[in-house]
Image (cartoon, rainbow, N blue to C red):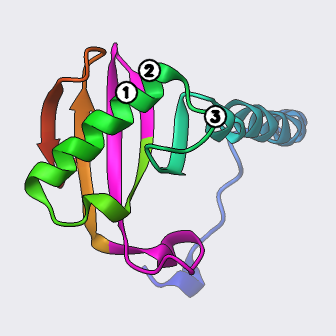
Amino acid sequence: MNCRNAKMLPSPVPPSARESRSAIVPAWALAFVLAFGGAGCSRESTAGVTADAPGLSPKEREILQAARQAVGQFENWAHRAEFKYERRDGVWHVTAWRVENPRATGNKRYVPWGSRHMIIDDAGKVLAYGDQR
């Protein structure tokens, strides 16, 4: 069948339902933005933090020191690493990023292959270390 000969089928949704559905979509989109838009504002998830950054809790400082030590055991760039961390499922998920361009902003600071992912428990023990999540 050729597209020119295709027939338009009537919509299975009555016009009154179509109008109410269009009103629901913006409400759904607003709910999505409110739910996930503020997710980055959580204190438990941070990016681009060094282990000696001001404002960290003692536990956060301890976890980031353990992460820096783990990176130092396997890599030669621990002294210039920045970290992103969050607490999930009772453990800390930490990503160390290798800073190559300290004067740049955003993702231009890092190299794509320069990240390591770790899972660290509350005692500071590294449970997993690797270059993939």
Determine whether 107 is above or below 18 in the image: below
* Image x and y of residue 4, in percent: 58, 86
Counting from the top left corner in percent of width and height, residue 48 is at 51, 54
Label 3 residue SS: loop
Find the magenta span and give its range: 85-111
Residue 102 lies in the magenta stretch? yes
Residue that numbered label 2 is attached to: 59
Q: Is residue 88 above or below residue 40?
A: above
Which quadrant would residue 64 be assigned to in this image? top left
**N-terminal label among 1 and 3:** 3
66 lies left or right of 35: left
Looking at the rendered structure, the secondary structure element under dot 1 is helix
Left or right of 24, for residue 32: left
Structural distance between the alpha carbons of marks 3 and 2:
12 Å
Identify residue type, mark 2.
Lys
Whether label 1 touches label 2, CB < 8 Å = yes
For the N terminus, give its image quadrant: bottom left
Which residue lies under the disc numbered 3?
55
Q: Which mark is residue 62?
A: 1
Q: How far separated are the C-alphas under marks 1 and 3?
A: 13 Å
Dot 1 surroundings within 10 Å: few (below 14), some, or many (20 or more)?
some
Q: Residue at x 31, y 60 (%)?
A: 79
